[in-house]
Amino acid sequence: MRPAATYPNTVTYNATITACAEAGELWREAWHQFSSMRAAEVTADAISFNATTCTFGRAGYWQEALEVCCCMPAVRLSVDEISCNASISACDSEGQWQVSLSLLSSMPAIRLVCNEI
């Protein structure tokens, strides 16, 4: 019996990106996986964006983390508490407290509840 062909999907990409985030130093691979989703005709979801945001944040790339988060509405995804928390953490870890504070104060305007990070 021949094995069925398997193709990556949103879940497999998300798992790979999340694993890269957990490893810390694999932010380039996480970005590659995230960027490859469109070419593979796989739709990125909020988990894809949030995991990529976390990956950049953990690697110290707060501006890139914000860029990923800010792209969510362009693909008709809503920024949620997880997205904001990941972005705030990325900024905070790099000493960008003004940006963190700005993000935190903007949460109620987009109907998000501030919670503990």
Image (spheres, rainbow, N blue to C red):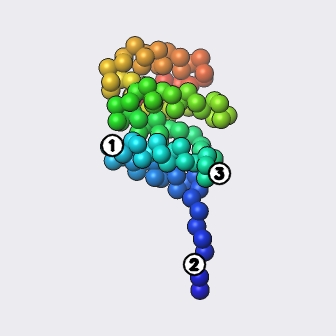
Of labels 2 and 1, earlier in sequence is: 2
Task: Choose between 5 and 109: the one closer to the eye.
Answer: 5
Label 3 – label 2 distance at C-alpha = 23 Å
Q: Position of residue 54 (x, y in %)?
A: 42, 37
Q: Please state which of the two labelled residues, at mark 1 or mark 3, is closer to the viewer.
A: 3
Please say if the residues under marks 3 and 2 sit with CB atoms less than 8 Å apart: no
Q: Earlier in the sequence, mark 3 or mark 2?
A: 2
Q: Is residue 108 left or right of residue 101?
A: right
Q: Which structural element holds mark 3? A: loop
Is there any visible trace of residue 26 in the rendered image? yes
Q: Which residue is mark 2?
A: 3
Report the residue that reaches farthest toward the right.
76
Whole-angstrom CA distance, mark 2 to mark 1, is: 34 Å
Residue located 46% across and 42% down the image: 31
Residue 106 image offset from top left, x and y in percent: 53, 17
Q: Name the residue: 59% across, 86% down.
A: 1
Of residues 42 and 98, which is closer to you in this image?
A: 42
Image mark for residue 41: 3
Image quadrant containing the C terminus: top left
Q: Residues within 10 Å of mark 1 (few under 14, many from 20)?
A: some
